[in-house]
Amino acid sequence: MRALTQGFLFFCYLFLSLTAGAFVWRSGLGAGAGVAAAIATLGLLAAVHIGISGKAERLALKKEIDQVRDAHRLLADAMESTQGALTELAQAIETGALSSTEQLSGEVRMLESLIQQMSESIDQRISQPAPTNTFEARHREQSNVLLQTIHEALSENRVDLYLQPIVSLPQRRTIFYESFTRLRAADDRVMMPAEYLSVAEGEGLVPAIDNLLLFRCAQIVRRLAKQDRKVGVFCNVALTSLGDETFFPQFLDFLSENRDLNQALIFELGQATFDARGAVEARNMAKLADLGFRFSIDKVQTLDLDFADLQRSDVKFMKVGADLLIETLLDTDSASALPALRDISAADFAGVTRRYGIELIAEKCETERQIVDILELDISVGQGHLFGEPRAIKEAVLAETDPPADFIRSTLLSADHRRRFG
């Protein structure tokens, strides 16, 4: 396009030059004067063209230089902003890594402390003189093997979490889960509580096992919550855990650092356990409530309860067997069955619990007929094999978030070495 324009201008200049030469020649000054006039005109026009073109080129060059300077300034600002963002990101990553490392170290230290307590108890048990009676000696040997298996399962994180759905009624949509912790032996055989509790109770190891299982349950729920599995999980807590002066302060620190779990973790006690709590246990429950954690009562044997006391203790859920609810509220006279609530009809019982801020959950639901009666009692939450059996969380889910096994193992081994050899 530029070459075409230049050619057009050249022919215009040539035309004007020839016109000027012809004009001079026709004026009678002769052909030489005409030629000279044409050449002079062409030179003048060329000079003017060169001057104008040069100025335009200089203006264009200046404009391009200004654009380059502006682009350089923007690039410098962008580089400075990017450098600042990278510095902030590096600091955030470093801070997050340090925080994660400190948190992991805190968990491992707590696990180390719990395992060490159990190790000491087992060592004391094993070091006792063997009975002279052959039957007692064989029983002692079997007990020692079982205790060692329990110890290894806990120290090597072979603790599985089973979840059973708790559903809304009548929609049957899962709104909570109840958790059950199970130990696995070295051959991956699942150990049910009935298998080891009798031995553990006889050796006074139940508190240590309860503490470890409670900690592992909270630990796993925390990891599930951080993977956006934001659903409430009921986790059983033993009276010994609430009253353990060594374990509970550490556990409270762990929950303080994970306060965001207060909607994901619901601590559950049996009715007999709740009624047997002393001042220490009640005070520790209040500390958990101050962090926003909620409580649930299960294994209910009677509906004649002190709801005001439950409310003061921050109990937000109460699980009652479906058969007990139906037998007490539908199959008998509710006034005689509930001396503390003589003026309350059976149909209003669930409403009474809600007025105290307690959601009634019908558990052990096994048949559709039970659901019909439960809905008649205005109970809107249910649990039982009818809605789903407890299922283990996939190992891959836990493996993605478990602390490094070699880190835990090395820490526990060093603790064991210090304990044995000073």
Image: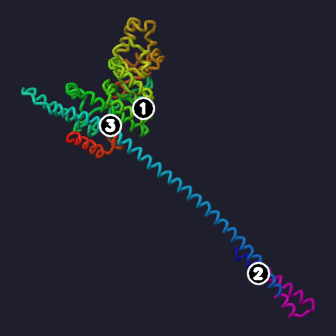
Numbered badge on residue 330: none
Instruction: Give the residues in magenta.
Output: 11-39
Q: Callout 3: few (<14), some (14-19), or many (20+) C-alpha neighbours within 10 Å?
A: some
Tell me residue 363's x, y (percent): 36, 21
The amino acid on which the numbered mark 2 sits, given as a three-letter code, is Phe
Q: Quadrant of residue 378?
A: top left
Mark 2 or 1, nearer chain start: 2
Q: Is residue 42 above or below residue 168?
A: below
- Residue assigned mark 1: 264
- The amino acid beneath tag 1 is Ala
Badge 1, how many Cα within 10 Å: few under 14, some, many 20+? many
Instruction: Give the Cα distance between marks 2 and 1.
Output: 86 Å
Query: Left or right: where does residue 196 sit relative to residue 331?
Result: left
Q: Where 387 falls versus 1 (above or below)?
A: above
Q: Nearer the viewer, residue 238 or 35?
A: 238
For disc 2, the marked residue is 10
Could you tell me the amino acid type at mark 3?
Met
